[in-house]
Amino acid sequence: MAHPTQPGFQDAASPLMEELLHFHDHTLMVILMISTLVLYIMITMAMAKLTDMLVLDSQEIEIIWTILPAIVLTFIALPSLRILYLMDEVSDPHLTIKATGHQWYWSYEYSDYENLEFDSYMIPTQDLTPGQFRLLEADHRMVIPVESPIRALVSAEDVLHSWAVPALGIKVDAIPGRLNQTTFMASHPGVFFGQCSEICGANHSFMPIAIEAVPLPHFENWTSLMIEDA
Amino acid sequence: MLHLTTGRVGSLLARRMTAALTSSSARMASHGHEVAANEDLSQPMYWDSTNVPLPDRRYKVTLSSEDERLKQKEKGPWDQLSKEEKLALYRLSFSQTFSEMNQPSAEWKTVVGAMFIFLGLTGLIVWWQKVHVFPKPPRTFDDEWQAKQLQRMLDMRMNPIEGISSKWDYEKGQWK
């Protein structure tokens, strides 16, 4: 989860999110350079003596400040497109999970082998035990095996929702009547939180997503227990 | 709704006529405002400007006899003019020198001072809001809860690569 007042992204827990972090760093550097240049120009112009105000045009600089931004943009666009296509790669997922948005909770279905379904409600603030994370804890987490490609099919029962987990670089809109697919992989074990990212009514801020990535034996244990309990 | 009597319409029209037929400066002056001298903009003007340094006319239009004598002397060789004469000739043609034109003013002090005053006032309002308006924050903001929360984040190894858990030395049980 995010540390209070943290200025940057959460650490990447999936390879795609790592790529996005690197891209963000790269683009931020470009932006920093451009902003510094603009700030310098602004200060220089503000402090300049107004002795030569009648310069009207100049072909050369106009050409330069058209070509140079185009080159800068290419430097941003190429890595961006690379990641875009990376996201669409088929990765032969080991597991398919359906995440369905409701007002105001998520439900998860693991239907590959047995029929495992459960709802995931936020734990209200008054029911938290000291140390738990307000607005993020869910009563049933979506457990996945670590280092396995997972396919998530996201949809909604009633209104628009969006299934987002920033640490894994996931944000998929949940649209009623539509099945959106994404694949992801948790690189290391842990709990990764997210919040509904499409306004869906009164409790839009109170339907979090909690994904728990565990080693495969633990995952198998969990599924057996969940199916027994059902 | 509004009944305009003939009298009221008459005075409305009269006021419009007065406004149209008198100059704004005449109206301003008659009401006790200060008014700048009206310039005839069709005649050559004088100005002091660093980026347009040579105005359309000399500063002093009407010259005294002393000034006339100087002007005659100016028509001869210039090395025969004394320094004071050269300066006097300059002051005939120009009101200010370049260094006088470029003199900084003390305006920045007013600006910066006013800026700090408003910042201070805003700060006062913000503090007052904190005390009298905002509700109590949720119990998860208590120091004890925050400490337990931080411990839980470290126990769960959250953000272990460059984030919070990477800053904690798990062997020594202290921050790195």
Image: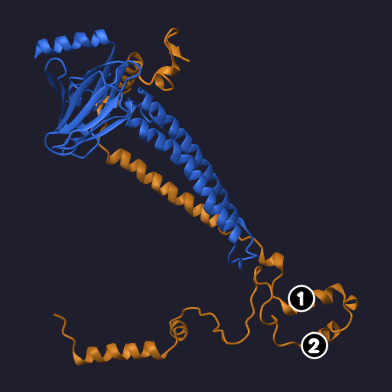
Q: Which quadrant, please, contains the N terminus of chain B? A: bottom left
Badge 1 density bin: few <14, some 14–19, many ≥20, Cα 10 Å: some
Q: Is residue A38 left or right of residue B133?
A: right
> Residue B90, which numbered label?
1
Vertical position of residue A198 compared to residue B165: above or below? below
SS class, disc 2:
helix
Same subunit, tags 2 and 1: yes
Q: Which residue type carries mark 2?
A: Glu
Residue, disc 2: B68
Q: Nearer the viewer, residue A86 or A217?
A: A86
Q: Nearer the viewer, residue A97 or B83?
A: A97
Q: Colour of chain A?
A: blue
Label 1 marks a residue whose chain is B
Which residue is at a point 79% across and 89% down the rendered structure image? B65
Chain displayed in orange: B
Which residue is at a point 62% across and 64% down the rendered structure image? A50
Where is residue B97? Give x, y as percent.
Answer: 72, 69
Q: Which residue type carries mark 1?
A: Tyr
Quadrant of residue B36 within the rendered picture = bottom right
Where is residue B25? Give x, y as percent.
Answer: 47, 83
Q: Is residue A50 left or right of residue A191?
A: right
Between discs 2 and 1, the one toward the N terminus: 2
Label 2 marks a residue whose chain is B
SS class, disc 1:
helix
